[in-house]
Amino acid sequence: MAKNNPISIPVSELRLGLTVKLPLSWTEHPFLINRIELKEQAQIEMIRGLKVQHVLVLAGAELLDEDVPKEEVPIEDDGFDEDMPERDVKREARVAIRKSQKRFLDCVNDSRSLVGKLGSDPEGAYRLSATLVEQMLEHLFEQEAAYLALVSAGEQGASVTQHGISVAVLSLMIAKSMDMPKKDMRDIALGALLHDIGKLRVPDNIRRKRGPLTTQEINFMNQHPNYGHEMLSRSGLFPEEVLHIIRHHHEFIDGTGFPGGLNGKKIPRTTQIVTLANDFEDQMTSHSIASPQVALGYLFKHRVGKHDEALIATLVKVLGIYPPGTLVHLTDGSLGKVMMTTREVKQPQVWACSAAGGDPGLRILMNEDVSIDRVIKIEELSEAAIRVLQADAPISYYFAALEA
């Protein structure tokens, strides 16, 4: 067998540890890239649910049994080159989603490096943070009208850094909609990125606890804004506006927040914006199944008077009628998950399938005589549809990397 040639195997022989490539175009499978390292059984089940009989094994062939039928495929002639698909609107949408995903992962990696430097190299951490903020602003202002894309780090839950990026993205979208000065937007971005840094001083058994926290644990957790402020103020490098966001991102305009019980007159607009974006994100992660609709509903029902009404209205405008991550029923009977907002709010880009989980693919509703007729709950989906739509995956946001 040629050393660099992949082999073709039946999908029935897939197993964890393999790295495979699908004989499908970009629009015919739900994965962000066509080179898939099989780390979870759910990935295997998703591939088995696609209309494909064989896959190419790019790495890990030694894990296969000797009796598994194999066929060598010259890599230069495999016919599945990801750069080959004809350019069209659907392809452009998939490229945009993948580009947003890559940018999000780059931000996650940079944020982790930034956090790692805070103690040992504060000046290096500050330089890296400033670079990261400028990069995010560049992505935000690439287009006159900014849109949101659904992204993921491929983990079970959002880390402090992932959560910070998603909050920063939402906060910057709000700030842009309000035509705020670039200086304020830089403070918002940096404050949002690091707003939960103090949680790293909270013991893991409290921070990652799945069940309800005790009163003592809640009190400990509620100290994280003070911990974060202490960590960052020690260097003397971060602006006061950023430090205010770090310390007061759980304050409400009615004075019922913590740690200072500040009211609206004492909370700068920059801090109020991050507080709202963080509250929305926290509501998504606090429920067993992340849902933008549940989070927005919670804000309208339980946060009356705690956030400025104009800011809430702007957040709703930014998210759209169907925020990315929303599970929907289409007028043709298909099911879908919103992947990216568009100028036509009722016709976003969705990853869709049949009720039984068949015929998966990216659909550009603006190009079809199809729209969303209602939002659905995960309980309404079959197990196959849940797998295909990745309906139970955590939700994070990044700016949609649309072509000019």
Image (cartoon, grey):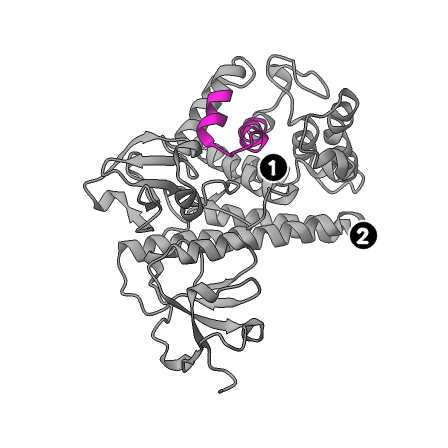
Judge left or right: residue 121 versus residue 174: right
Q: Which residue sits furthest left?
A: 369
Magenta highlight: main SS: helix
The residue segment tinted magenta is 275-298
From what the image shows, is residue 182 above or below residue 222?
Answer: below
Is 293 inside the magenta-drawn segment? yes
State the image coordinates of residue 161 (x, y, percent, origin top left). 63, 44
One can see residue 318 in this view = no
Question: Mark 2: which secondary structure?
Answer: helix
Mark 2 and mark 1 lie on one chain; the one further toward the N terminus is 2
Mark 1 nearby-residue class (10 Å; few <14, some 14–19, many ≥20) = many
Say which of 18 and 246 sits in front: 18
From what the image shows, is residue 162 above or below residue 184?
Answer: below
Judge left or right: residue 354 versus residue 319: left
- Please give the residue where the numbered disc 1 appears in the rendered image: 192
State the image coordinates of residue 167 (x, y, percent, origin top left). 56, 37
From what the image shows, is residue 367 above or below residue 201?
Answer: below
Question: Which residue does the image show at 75% across and 33% down from the upper left?
Answer: 206
Question: Mark 1: which secondary structure?
Answer: helix
Looking at the rendering, which quadrant does residue 198 occupy?
top right
Type of amino acid under label 1: Ala
- Please give the residue where the numbered disc 2 appears in the rendered image: 120
